[in-house]
Amino acid sequence: MVISKNMENLVAGSSVIRKLFEEGLQMAQIYGADKVYDFSLGNPASPVPEKVHEAIKDVLNNNSDAYVHGYMKNAGFEETRQAVADYLNKSFGMGYGGEDIVMTVGAAGAMNCIFRAILSPEDEVIAFAPFFGEYKNYASNYGGKLTVVPADTDTFDLNLKELDKNITEKTKCIIVNNPNNPSGRIYSKETIEELGKIVDEAEKRVGHPIYILCDEPYRQLAYDGKAVPYIPSIIKNSIYIYSYSKTLSIPGERIGYLAISKNADCYDELIGAFVVANRCLGYVNAPSLFQLVISRCQDVTVDLDFYDRNRKVLYDSLTKLGFDVVKPEGAFYLLVKSPIEDCDKFVELAKEQHIIFVNTMTFGCPGYVRIAYCVDYEMIKRSINAFKQLAIKCGISS
Amino acid sequence: MVISKNMENLVAGSSVIRKLFEEGLQMAQIYGADKVYDFSLGNPASPVPEKVHEAIKDVLNNNSDAYVHGYMKNAGFEETRQAVADYLNKSFGMGYGGEDIVMTVGAAGAMNCIFRAILSPEDEVIAFAPFFGEYKNYASNYGGKLTVVPADTDTFDLNLKELDKNITEKTKCIIVNNPNNPSGRIYSKETIEELGKIVDEAEKRVGHPIYILCDEPYRQLAYDGKAVPYIPSIIKNSIYIYSYSKTLSIPGERIGYLAISKNADCYDELIGAFVVANRCLGYVNAPSLFQLVISRCQDVTVDLDFYDRNRKVLYDSLTKLGFDVVKPEGAFYLLVKSPIEDCDKFVELAKEQHIIFVNTMTFGCPGYVRIAYCVDYEMIKRSINAFKQLAIKCGISS
């Protein structure tokens, strides 16, 4: 083996989601795109907002090439960082300055910068199941380990009663993904306040700060008017992570940021390390054109109805067919309990009906599958008959 | 300290170049941009080629948003990878398929993917001085160590006679940066063939492949018709790394790639690991719009005259003023020997004249400074008098 030991496992257990996505592309070539129902990936299908098109034109037409496509400070353009800070201050009553923002290559890039900065080998990161499986890989890049707090499959709320026993002296941070991928659960203000209390106590015990990484790319996707609390306004030692992938439907462009308040412990040390990590991990800076584009799109909101329609029709249809579905409050994922004991077989049976979804085993939530409903409504409607056949095959419908 | 041990050193010794660049921005605000002569950074000043503007329009106008801004395979768009393979095959007589190309977040992103894939803690990477200082940081991200082969300051050619003694059983790869940053030296076909022989012998001795990482963002910048050999056509175990930053003057957009031939040892293992590394390091994929833009710009060449004019006037002027200058054959950097013993003081004296350049101590080449002449010709002309004052201060001119 010429690849590193630590890489072998990653390659062997490579992303199930990505593998399914690539399988879906192949199936579409064989059977025709309209006969494959690919619910594998969080690739948002809602149209790119017109404001983004306008911003691209504005940036390209009214600035020098050297500015738009050249290097800037590793942390990003001043105007972009200020626009982000202003937006967060206005929206959540915070007091960020532009210097508290680091523009990153998406939320995944932000999380890697943070892990690179704070993790030494054997350090621990806590995630609550169900969680986005890549967290484990991000931590492993720097020798870190992911500790998983098991899911509370009754409520899918943060399983706080299991948290404290998982915090050790090696714990550097706790990831909270709100709204949650894959459960669609939104954690309430009360839940976050309770989390804050537990972490406060734990910090005293272990003698060092434990940061909450607030991974919130789905923040705008909250249905039925449900509020998503802004964690950094509740818990001091928070690092906020955002991506424009879902809100603006531009996941391929890799644009996001991290924000840390000056009130956080060791602020100076951290902000400096994040910027250096952004450079040394080879990102150098977040893509320049799209930094300037998102500066001009801070007030753009997602087309919530687009996804809500999908949510409703899928939830209703699948429930009616006899599936046990977790009703999502946010994001664009839906958990379905496997109606048969072997969840892998459930995924295979679905594939026979040209339905592609993901076993959430790698999300720390065995026995469920994730349906990403960030797809065309028409595809969902076409898929319902295939789901019906699947229900019959699984023996829950006739 | 909440940041990791390994990060502390990075932050403490943070990029001298970047610090100077940011200092230059401040000086420009104080004294006026036209009175500061900033030669710190490889931020190319030649205009973005018209073909790039056309390609941006073409991509945006003739494709769906979902395609242009959405997710694709982690390795990149099929059409982009095929365009790159076709270009390399046509230019260098290679036999790459699109599947041998991984689109990356610049050359820095490519190198991080490779290091993530092949380095275990304590593994060694060899670089020939003078070398781009960031190599050391890239290796350290994964616990790797950089072994530096000292510069041959008589010729600034690859110091091959010092290579073999630095290869150990921990050596995983050797970086060759051609044309070289910061010396501007181009390594000839004969030099590369000689390198191939040494590495061949060493591979037998250590019992595993040693890959040549061909870091070639400056490939198109070769003056006086000098040829830059294509290393993968000479040495089997090569991994080619390219960036469009310099050729197309778009360093902020972060677009590049790595290419590996199926003839390389352990090809299958490596290509799989590179793609997984691209995902897990949080790049996920190279920025999508610019992947499609560069597919359409494979035949665009750099405006060599733009930089050649700068090279000539600087080389001639500084030589005339009594400075000891290494004449560059490629890239857009120029090494000047410090005329006083304390090279840091030389940098400070230059700053007093509003000239900003970098001590190449961190490039493994003490006693020299690097002048990045990828700037406006007019700025260079304005700077000559300041260089004259500097020569007087240093006592080499009157």
Image (tube, coloured by chain):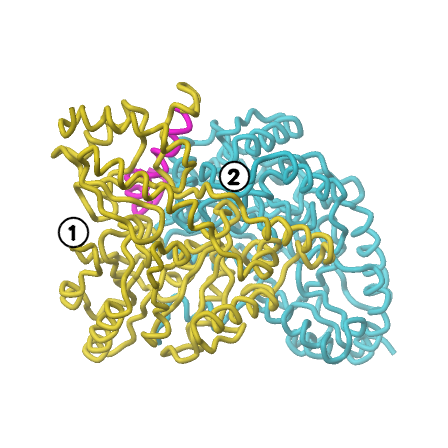
Chain colours: A cyan, B yellow
Q: Secondary structure at mark 2?
A: helix
Q: Is residue B81 above or below residue A63?
A: below
Residue B338 appears left or right of B354: left
Asked whether residue A166 is in view, the answer is: no
The dot on residue B153 is 1
Q: Is residue A390 above or below residue B159?
A: below
Q: Chain of mark 1?
A: B
Q: Secondary structure at mark 1?
A: loop
Q: Magenta part of the protein: which range?
A: B1-27
**Which quadrant would residue B360 be assigned to in this image?**
top left
Residue type for callout 1? Thr
Q: Is residue B352 above or below residue B251?
A: above
Instruction: Provide residue A147's location: percent of width, then percent of height.
Output: 47, 55
Instruction: Provide residue A243's location: percent of width, then percent of height.
Output: 60, 45
For label 2, the crowd category at 10 Å Cα-Cα, with few meaning under 14, some 14 to 19 and many 20 or more, is some
Magenta stretch containing residue B5, yes or no?
yes
Name the residue tied to disc 2: A66
Q: Quadrant of the N terminus of chain B?
A: top left
The count of marks equals: 2
**Residue at the image position 23 percent from the left and 67 percent from the top:** B191
State how far apart marks 1 and 2 are (Cα): 34 Å
Instruction: Provide residue A317's location: percent of width, then percent of height.
Output: 85, 64
Q: Nearer the viewer, residue A345 or A274?
A: A274
